[in-house]
Image: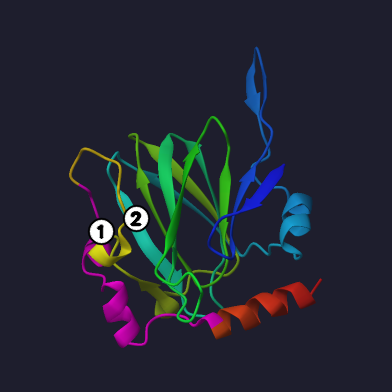
Amino acid sequence: MKASELPISGAWVFEPPVFRDARGAFSAAFQGTAFRKALGFNLDVAQTNHSVSARGVIRGVHFADVPPGQAKYVYCPRGVLLDVVVDVRIGSPTFGEHASVELDAESCRAVYLAEGLGHAFVALTDDTVMSYLCSTPYNPAGERGVSPLDPALELLWPVDVEPQLSEKDAAAPTLAEAQMAALLPTWEACSKRYEKLRGQV
């Protein structure tokens, strides 16, 4: 499995081999050994999530309070989507920047987001499935979000249909508003969390 870090620290792309024959295809979208080799610690999975989205649906930008935060390992077992990582960590060298990766069922490509990073995606086909491995359980009190349509983020959603958002995402604050309301994680808190994870190995 090939692993490469995105321009935003703590965000990685994993590309597993896909074995095809007359019966179909097989791939291991997550491999613990490859993950540990790339990041220096194991991914503890506390919860798995599964979403199905129509074309043009945008979910995000979501993140969780740190500590403990919620790291995610995401892949697309059906359809095609554009996955977006947004750095919402105050004090990070890439604060406010984003990176995008297309995920699809053919490549089995996956993205890992460390705690404190914002996550969003848009479905590029109908019935697109997103699967998540999450490091911590869902905690409604610690869940946060910023608007995926915030002009300051300059997120270019490549769909020619009207974007569909949940009421919660549509009402989410801009990045600047979230910062003023002290809703964003800090680079310092996130760095301590990453160091703690590496020290457990």
Work out which quarter of the rendered image holds the C terminus and state it: bottom right
* Residue type at numbered disc 2: Arg
- Residue at figure coordinates x 70%, y 78% from the top left: 195
Q: Residue furthest top?
A: 22
- Residue at figure coordinates x 56%, y 51% from the top left: 111
> Which of the 4 image quadrants contains residue 137?
bottom right
Is residue 179 highlighted in magenta? yes
Residues at marks 1 and 2, CA–CA distance in whole angstroms:
8 Å
Q: Give the image location of residue 87, x and y in percent.
A: 45, 68
Q: Give the image location of residue 167, x and y in percent.
A: 22, 63
The residue under label 1 is 166
Work out which quarter of the rendered image holds the N terminus and state it: top right
The residue under label 2 is 59
Nearest to N terminus: mark 1 or mark 2? 2
| Left or right of 10, for residue 100 | left
Q: Residue furthest front?
A: 93
**SS for tag 1?**
loop
Q: Nearer the viewer, mark 1 or mark 2?
A: 2
Is residue 134 highlighted in magenta? no
- Residue at figure coordinates x 65%, y 50% from the top left: 4
* Residue type at numbered disc 1: Ser
| Left or right of 20, for residue 49 | left
Count neighbours of disc 1 (C-alpha within 10 A) and say few if under 14, some if 14 to 19, many if 20 or more.
few
- Residue at figure coordinates x 60%, y 66% from the top left: 135
Q: Give the image location of residue 198, x and y in percent.
A: 75, 73
Q: Above or below — where is 140 with respect to 108?
A: below
| Left or right of 73, for residue 117 | left
Residue 3 visible: yes
What's the mark number on residue 8? none
Please tell me which residue lies in front, 72 or 155.
155
Q: Which residues are magenta?
A: 163-187
Q: Above or below — where is 199 with respect to 138?
A: below
